């Protein structure tokens, strides 16, 4: 059996999961002084949401993920857009220590991880990352907004209620985006030896149609919770009833990066 990100989830992720606005990529590029000679490693790259826009700012990017279906969708997205300076690597955060031997110390300008830190043993990743980073470079723990069912809007609360009824469980996890988790990552970056640890964010609003809302939900429903094709019409009907007849759902997205620098 594949991971939570295998199979159809990867397709929904590639199609519906929000990407990162150029202003946020500017912010990362400025923080780490990214330039034409630099190489970046994106750990937990998924279908390349962060990897692809970073690639236009540097010499090359390594997009690394343990799920082959996510990597296949990322590779297809890069080919569609004619992006040729990304190496897609099947692997996870546990492979990062060996990269210091393979690539050499101080060989990377930045290590990024977008919406994946809650799936990773973060203390080990941070310790392994530091020797890989050149001076002035650093690590960014990126949170791309909050889950669709955890936003401070009536439609989001209704979505959460509908999902909890369907799944018969409480949806308590914020996937590493909540303040307490960010505080833990911040402390761990400092403990690993990163300097000037701070948060930077870019805020924007986006309107989703119902299809995008459902697609976004599917992109986050891995494993056994993912409705099978014959359950899907009933699931969508159930969510439609929960959120009501509106055709536009406005989300306020805060894209936040917890940044630590290598001295
Ligand atoms: C929510 S997706 C994030 C994708 C993308 N980075 C983004 O910003 O949207 C999480 C990804 O983390 C990957 N993942 C899970 N465990 C991991 C690990 N130990 N190391 C690296 N990636 C991991 C999953 O396969 C999945 O593709």
Image (cartoon, rainbow, N blue to C red):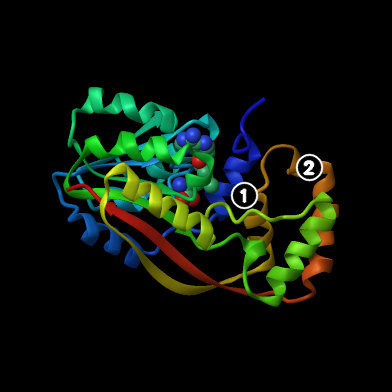
Label 1 Cα crowd, 10 Å radius (few <14 / some 14-19 / many 20+): many
From what the image shows, is residue 85 above or below residue 195? above
Give the structural element (helix, strand or loop) at label 2.
helix
Using residue 118 as the reference point, say whether residue 89 is left or right of it. left
User: Is residue 131 something one can see in this rendering?
Assistant: yes
Task: Give the distance between the C-alpha atoms of the residues marked 1 and 2, in whole angstroms.
Answer: 15 Å
Q: Residue at x 30, y 38 (%)?
A: 129
Q: Residue at x 35, y 48 (%)?
A: 189
- Tell how many labels: 2
From what the image shows, is residue 159 above or below residue 224? below
Q: Residue at x 19, y 53 (%)?
A: 34
Camera-side residue of 151 and 23: 151
Location of the N terminus by quadrant is top right
* Whole-percent x, y for residue 18 in the image: 51, 59
* Whole-percent x, y for residue 162 in the image: 80, 62
* Whole-percent x, y for residue 139 in the image: 31, 48
Q: Residue at x 86, y 53 (%)?
A: 234
User: Is residue 71 something one can see in this rendering?
Assistant: no
Which residue was labeled with disc 1?
A: 219
* Whole-percent x, y for residue 141 in the image: 40, 51
Camera-side residue of 80 and 234: 234
Camera-side residue of 39 and 132: 132
Earlier-in-chain disc, 1 versus 2: 1
Foreground tag (1 vs 2)? 1
From what the image shows, is residue 84 above or below residue 30? above
Which residue was labeled with disc 2?
A: 229
Using residue 260 as the reference point, say whether residue 4 is left or right of it. right
């Amino acid at each position: 059996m594949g991971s939570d990100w295998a199979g159809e989830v990867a397709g929904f992720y590639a199609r519906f999961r929000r990407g990162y606005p150029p202003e946020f990529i500017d912010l990362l590029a400025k923080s780490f002084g990214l330039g034409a000679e630099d190489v970046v490693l994106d750990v937990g790259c998924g279908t390349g949401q962060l990897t692809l826009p970073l690639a236009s700012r540097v010499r090359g990017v390594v997009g690394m993920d343990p799920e082959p279906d996510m990597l296949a969708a990322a590779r297809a997205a890069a080919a569609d857009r004619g992006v040729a300076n990304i190496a897609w690597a099947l692997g996870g955060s546990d492979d990062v220590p060996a990269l210091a031997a393979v690539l050499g110390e101080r060989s990377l300008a930045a290590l990024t991880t977008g919406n994946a830190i809650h799936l990773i043993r973060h203390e080990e990743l941070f310790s392994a990352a530091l020797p890989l980073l050149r001076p002035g470079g650093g690590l960014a723990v990126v949170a791309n907004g909050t889950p669709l069912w955890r936003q401070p809007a009536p439609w989001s609360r209704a979505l959460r209620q509908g999902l909890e009824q369907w799944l018969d469980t409480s949806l308590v996890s914020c996937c590493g985006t909540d303040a307490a988790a960010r505080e833990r990552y911040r402390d761990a970056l400092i403990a690993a030896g990163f300097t000037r640890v701070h948060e930077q964010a870019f805020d924007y609003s986006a309107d989703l149609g119902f299809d995008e809302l459902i697609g976004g939900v599917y992109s986050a429903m891995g494993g056994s919770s993912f409705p099978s094709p014959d359950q899907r019409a009933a699931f969508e009907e159930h969510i439609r009833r929960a959120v009501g007849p509106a055709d536009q759902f406005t989300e306020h997205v805060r894209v936040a990066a917890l940044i630590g620098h290598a001295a």
